[in-house]
Image (tube, rainbow, N blue to C red):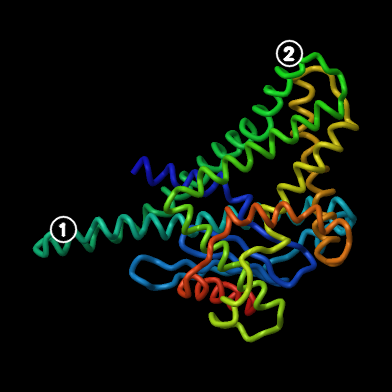
Amino acid sequence: MIFKHFKHFIFTAASWALNSSDDEILVGGQAVIEGVMMRSPKGYSVAVRRQDGTVRVMKDALFGLGERWKAFKLPILRGVGVLGQALVLGIRALRFSAEEALTDDQTAQGHHYPVSAAFQVATAKIETKKDTSQVSSWLIAGNLVLALGVNVILFVALPLVITRLLQTQIGFQSSILFNGIDGLLRVLVFVIFLYSVSWMKDMNRVFQYHGAEHKTVYNFEARQELNVTNAQKFSTLHPRCGTSFLLVVMIVSILVFSVAKFDSFTAKLLSRIVLLPLVAGISYEIIRYSAKHPNSLLRWVTFPGLLLQKITTQPPNDKQVEIAIRALEEALTV
C-alpha cells in the first residue's frame, strides 16, 4: 500500500512534464495513470482504461480565464492564466485516474474471497466505492503538497545552495555567472530526475500514454481521420509539451534572475518563487510564438526540449493510442 502511494506521488511530482496546453490551439492534453486527459476549446475529457479492460470517461465544459477576465488576454498574463488552468485540470485528471486505480486494486483484492462469502464480497465492493473518493482525495491532496515541496527543494533550493557554495569557494561576483551556474544546475537536476523516474515500470507506462497523447494531437492537427493507424504514423515529440516548456522556463529564469539582483541567500530563494509567474508567462510567449512560426530563430529554443522528450515520451501500443483518441473525441463533443 505504501509503495502504491509512493507511485502516485511520483506521478504527481512529474505531472508538470506531461502537460501541453494553450488557450488558442485546438487541442492539448496530459498523460495520467493508465489514461489520457485531452482538452478542446470548449471542454476537456479524461479516459482511463481499468484492469478489466473497460474504459471510464470523465468530461466537462471548460471556460478560459480570458473569457472571464480581460486581463488574462494580455501577453505574459495569458500564459499565467493558461498554465494555472492547466494545473487545475491536471490535478482533476490525476485524481480521477487515481480513483480508478484504487478501485481496481481494492476490487482485485476482493476476488480472493471464498465463493461462500459472496455477501461479504458485495458489501466490500459497495464500501470500496464509498471510500475510494475520500481516500484518493486525501492521497492527491497530500501528494500535491509533498510534490510541490519536493519540486521547490530539488529545482530551486538545491541548485541555489550548490551555486552559493561554489561562489564562496571560487570567489566570483558576477550576477550573470551566478545565475548561469544556478540555471545549468537546475537543468541538470531536472534531467536526472526525469531519467531516474523513467526507470520505474509504472512511470514508463505513463510515458507511453504521453506518447499516445502527442501522436493523437498530431493526427488531429494534420486534419486526418482520427484512428490508431493514422496516429501511429506521427512522432511522439511535440513542441508544445510541458517538458519543452519547463526547459524554456529554466533558460528564461537565468535572464530574469540576472536582472532582478538580490544579495542574501534568503532573498534569492524567495525571488525565485515570487518571480516564477513572470518567468512562466515569458516562457509561454516564446513557446507560443515558436509554435506559430516554425522557421523563426526562437524555434531553436524549444529544440532541447524535444530532445528531452525522448525520456518523457515512449512509443505507445495501439490500445494506449485508442485511449488517447477516445479522450480527444469525448473532449470535442463537450
| Label 2 residue SS | helix
At x 86% / y 61%, what residue is drawn? 289
Give the answer, above or below, for where 264 lies relative to 184: above
Q: How many numbered marks does the figure carry?
A: 2
Question: In the image, residue 76 lies at what x, y percent?
Answer: 86, 51
In terms of depth relative to the viewer, which is nearer, 261 or 267?
261
In terms of depth relative to the viewer, which is nearer, 61 or 228?
228
Q: Is 44 positioned to the left or the right of 269 in the image? A: left
In terms of depth relative to the viewer, which is nearer, 246 or 51?
246
User: Label 1, on which residue?
Assistant: 113
Quarter occupied by residue 290 = bottom right
- Name the kind of residue labelled 1 in the image: Tyr
Q: Residue furthest left?
A: 116
Q: Is 150 positioned to the left or the right of 7 in the image? A: right
- Name the kind of residue labelled 2 in the image: Gln
Q: Is 79 positioned to the left or the right of 307 in the image? A: right
At x 72% / y 19%, what residue is drawn? 166
At x 67% / y 85%, what residue is drawn? 224
Question: In the image, residue 252 lies at what x, y percent?
Answer: 82, 43
User: Label 2, on which residue?
Assistant: 169
Q: Quadrant of the C terminus?
A: bottom right
Quarter occupied by residue 180 = top right
Distance in Å between CA atoms under marks 2 and 1: 64 Å
At x 29% / y 60%, what residue is drawn? 107
